Image: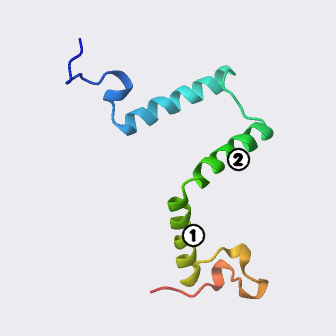
Amino acid sequence: MGQSTETKRGFAAMNAEQQRLIASQGGKAAHEKGTAHEFTSEEARAAGRKGGEAVSQNREHMAEIGRKGAEARSQGNGNRRNRSAGQQMKADEQPQQG
């Protein structure tokens, strides 16, 4: 008891891939059984708002997001929704990269 070199057991002893596989199986089983929680749109909205508020408190993180967005925009990788209709190209009209 109180050893500083305790060995990991159960989920903690598994690698991330094994943990995801087991968690996925559990989620699928819960949905099949009908016991899985399904968020209403209001619950999902509230959770998203809470997460957004928590993330936005980290000013350094928000600044990094802004820098990445500005860099992408300056390289011509802006969001397609923000382009005017005349600037949008269909996939078959895109210039070929060789």
Residue 95, x across and y down, in percent:
57, 88
Q: Which mark is residue 66?
A: 1
The Cα–Cα distance between marks 2 and 1, rounded to whole angstroms, is: 19 Å
Q: Which mark is residue 49?
A: 2
* Depicted 94 relative to depicted 42: above or below: below
Q: Residue at x 52, y 33 (%)?
A: 24
Residue toward you, 87 or 6:
6
Q: Decide if residue 81 is on the left or right side of residue 70.
A: right
Q: Residue at x 58, y 29 (%)?
A: 28
Amino acid type of the residue tagged 1 in the rendering = Gly
Q: Residue at x 52, y 71 (%)?
A: 68
Q: Give SS at disc 2.
A: helix
Q: Give SS at disc 1.
A: helix
* Depicted 6 relative to depicted 41: above or below: above
Query: Badge 2 local density, few (<14 within 10 Å), some, or many (20+)?
Result: few
Q: Give the mark, 2 or 1, whose residue is nearer the N terminus.
A: 2
